[in-house]
Image (cartoon, helix red, strand yellow):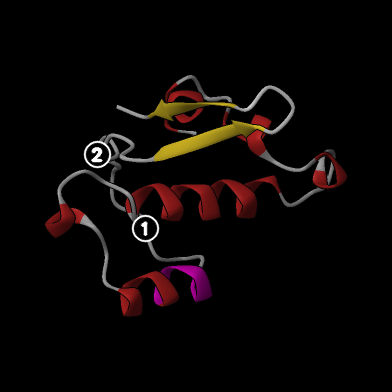
Amino acid sequence: VWRLWGENMALQVVDQTLEGTRHNDEILRCIHIGLLCVQEDASSRPRMSKVVAMLENSSLILPSILPPAPPTWKIKILSLGAQTSSTISGT
């Protein structure tokens, strides 16, 4: 999402059932708020009360977004047929 946001193509992550609706500004606002919540520096992330205020009041100006924290996840894939597994890590 961060990459698409930087390329002005964030709407590509939106479910196809919402495509072509007149709510693109609201959708982009929600994406913007979501990206604020995953900024690498935790002190730059908004408090939940601020998130609620930003969602409720569309006239609030949203702050600029800093890059998100790098992914720190692992997915273990198990193939039952071949009895093998592999791990995918985000860095």
The quadrant of the rendering that contains the C terminus is: top left
State which region is magenta. 53-57
Picture layout, residue 35 above or below residue 67: below
How far apart are the two marked residues, 1 and 2, measured between alpha carbons? 16 Å
Picture layout, residue 44 above or below residue 14: below
Q: Which residue is mark 2?
A: 66
Task: Tell which circle, 1 or 2, labels the residue nearer the N-terminal end.
Answer: 1
Q: Is residue 10 magenta?
A: no
Mark 1 vs mark 2: in front: 2
Is residue 60 shown left or right of residue 78? left
Q: In the rendering, which numbered label is found on residue 61? A: 1
Callout 2, which amino acid?
Leu
Is residue 43 shown left or right of residue 38? left
Q: Residue 34: x and y, percent?
A: 44, 53
Picture layout, residue 69 above or below residue 8: below
Mark 1: give few (<14), some (14-19) or many (20+) Cα within 10 Å.
few
> Which residue is found at the position 83% from the left and 39% from the top?
16
